[in-house]
Amino acid sequence: MAQSSPPPLDPSSAPIMEGFVPTPLHREAFRAKFLRKIRENPLVPIGCLTTAGALTYGLICFHRGNTRQSQLMMRTRVVAQGFTIAALVVGMVATALKSQK
């Protein structure tokens, strides 16, 4: 069996979609997108900030030698991470349900 090259592309034979008007893609600025995402699901940034705060304070306590407080902050960090993941999942489910309607 000999391999043949694909047929040449003929734009004139392409199907024409009536009423189709090509528009440029809408590009959302980073800041606008960031603020929109925060408004859609405000629990995620709260969880992220809580996680970062607990981690930072836990590392400071560890550096100072306060191991008890450091361990407490690391446990708090794990709980805050779990909260953030749960907020992400709930937000994704809510968005999926909203798009189905």
Image (spheres, rainbow, N blue to C red):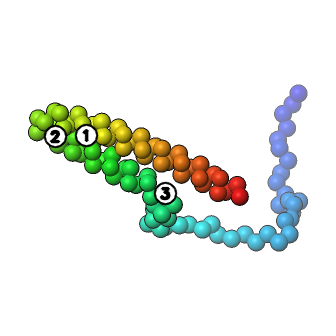
Question: Residue 101 sits in which quadrant?
Answer: bottom right
Name the residue that disc number 2 marks.
61
Pinpoint residue 9: horizontal percent, then vertical percent: 82, 54
Neighbor class of circle 3 (other Cα within 10 Å; few <14, some 14-19, many 20+) is some
| Residue at 85% in and 38% down | 4
Quarter of the picture containing the N terminus is top right
Q: Which picture quadrant has residue 80?
A: top left
Q: Secondary structure at mark 3?
A: loop
Question: Circle 1: is it few (<14), some (14-19), or many (20+) Cα within 10 Å?
Answer: many
Query: How far from the left and from the top, in percent, is residue 21?
Result: 76, 72
Residue ranking furthest to the top: 1
Q: Which residue is mark 3?
A: 41
Q: Residues within 10 Å of mark 2 (few under 14, many from 20)?
A: some
Calculate the distance from the C-alpha at mark 1 to the C-alpha at mark 2: 9 Å
| Secondary structure under the numbered disc 1 in the rendered image | helix
Q: Would you say 13 lies left or right of 20 here? A: right
Specify whether 34 is left or right of 4: left
Q: Which residue is mark 1?
A: 73
Please give the name of the residue rendered at 86% of the width and 69% of the height, measured from the top-left corner: 18
Percent from the top left, x then y, of residue 25?
A: 62, 66
Query: In the image, what residue type sits under mark 3?
Result: Asn
